[in-house]
Image (tube, rainbow, N blue to C red):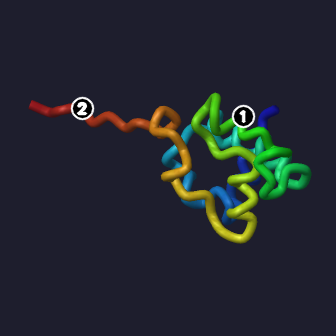
């Protein structure tokens, strides 16, 4: 599922914009859709996204319904890397 860019203007994703890829944001958006079912209950959630991808699972995301997802909850593998060329 690909999510239209305007979805990412929501406060929930504010701390992640420009620091993780669009692919990563899409994965989180899809997982966030499970918050309504899982809530804060790890038994219902299963925490598969956290275990297999190092991304916040539904029960973790439920904590940020009112705030923003902190970058620290995203495994470094998913962080966008910027390279500067060295001018000599």
Is residue 26 left or right of 76 when viewed as pictured?
right
In the drawing, does residue 3 fall left or right of residue 72? right
Q: Nearer the viewer, residue 81 or 51?
A: 51
Q: Position of residue 25 (x, y in %)?
A: 66, 42
Where 24 falls versus 33 (above or below)? Answer: above
Check the picture and name the quadrant holding the N terminus: top right
Residue 57 percent coordinates (x, y): 71, 44
**Given this view, does label 2 or label 1 mark the residue nearer the observer?**
1
Question: In the picture provided, is 63 more to the left or to the right than 54?
Answer: right
Q: Nearer the viewer, residue 76 or 59?
A: 59
Label 2 Cα neighbours within 10 Å, binned few <14 / some 14-19 / many ≥20: few
Q: Quadrant of residue 31?
A: top right
Q: CA distance from mark 2 to mark 1?
A: 38 Å
Quarter of the image where one finds residue 61: bottom right
Q: Residue furthest bottom?
A: 66
- The residue at the point 70 percent across, 63 percent down is 63
State whether residue 75 is above or below residue 14: above
User: Which residue is label 1 attached to?
Assistant: 48
Residue at 72% x, 70% y: name it. Answer: 66
In the rendered view of the protein, which quadrant contains the C terminus? Answer: top left
Q: Name the residue furthest right.
A: 37
Label 2, on which residue?
Answer: 85
Of callouts 2 and 1, the N-terminal one: 1
Out of 77 and 17, give the one closest to the viewer. Answer: 77
Q: Secondary structure at mark 1?
A: helix
Q: Is residue 33 left or right of residue 49?
A: right
67 versus 22 height, above or below: below
């Amino acid at each position: 599922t690909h999510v239209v860019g305007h979805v990412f203007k929501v406060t929930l994703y504010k701390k992640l914009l420009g620091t993780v890829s669009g692919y990563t944001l899409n994965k989180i958006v899809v997982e966030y859709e499970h918050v309504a079912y899982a809530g804060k209950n790890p038994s219902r959630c299963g925490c598969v996204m956290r275990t297999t991808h190092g991304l916040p699972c539904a029960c973790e995301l439920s904590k940020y319904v009112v705030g923003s997802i902190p970058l620290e909850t995203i495994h470094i593998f998913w962080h966008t890397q910027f390279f500067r060329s060295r001018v000599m």
